[in-house]
Amino acid sequence: MFDAAEKYLRGVLQERFDPKIRPPITMWKNQLAEKISESKALTREYNTLKDETYKIEQIRASVKTILHNDTPQPERTPQKSRGAEI
C-alpha cells in the first residue's frame, strides 16, 4: 500500500520531484498564466491604438473635407451657344 500511495502522490505533487523525471507541469502553468496576462495587456494596448487611429482618421477626413470645400470654384463665364445671345 505504501508503494501505491507513493506512486499516487508522485503523480499529484509534481513540484516535489525531479523535473528530469517528470514534466514540470507547475512551471508550465506559471508560464501559461504569465503569457495570458501578457496577452491581455497587449490586447488592451492594441484596442487603445485602434481607437486612437480611428479618431485620427476621422479628423484627417474632416480636415480634407474642409480644405476641399474652402477652395474657390472657378467662375464660369457666360458663353454663346448656338446663336443665343447673352
Image (cartoon, rainbow, N blue to C red):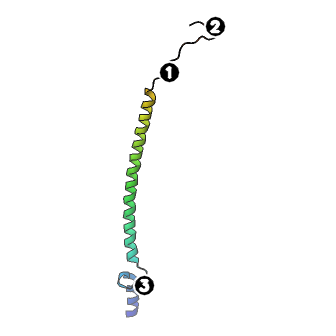
Q: Residues within 10 Å of mark 1 (few under 14, many from 20)?
A: few
Horizontal and vertical percent position of residue 8: 40, 86
Looking at the rendered image, the disc whose residue lies closer to the viewer, 3 or 1, is 1
The residue that appears at 42% across and 31% down in the rendered structure is 66
Which three-letter amino acid code belongs to the residue tagged 1?
Pro
Looking at the rendered image, the disc whose residue lies closer to the viewer, 1 or 2, is 1
The residue that appears at 41% across and 46% down in the rendered structure is 53
Which element carries disc 1, helix, strand or loop? loop
Which element carries disc 2, helix, strand or loop? loop
Horizontal and vertical percent position of residue 3: 40, 93
Viewer-closest of 81 and 40: 81
Res. 1 in view: no
Viewer-closest of 59 and 12: 59
Viewer-closest of 32 and 64: 64
Q: Residues within 10 Å of mark 2 (few under 14, many from 20)?
A: few
What's the mark number on residue 83?
Answer: 2
Question: Which residue extends farthest top?
Answer: 85
Spatial separation of the CA atoms under disc 3 and disc 1? 83 Å
What's the mark number on residue 74?
Answer: 1
Spatial separation of the CA atoms under disc 3 and disc 2? 102 Å
What's the mark number on residue 20?
Answer: 3
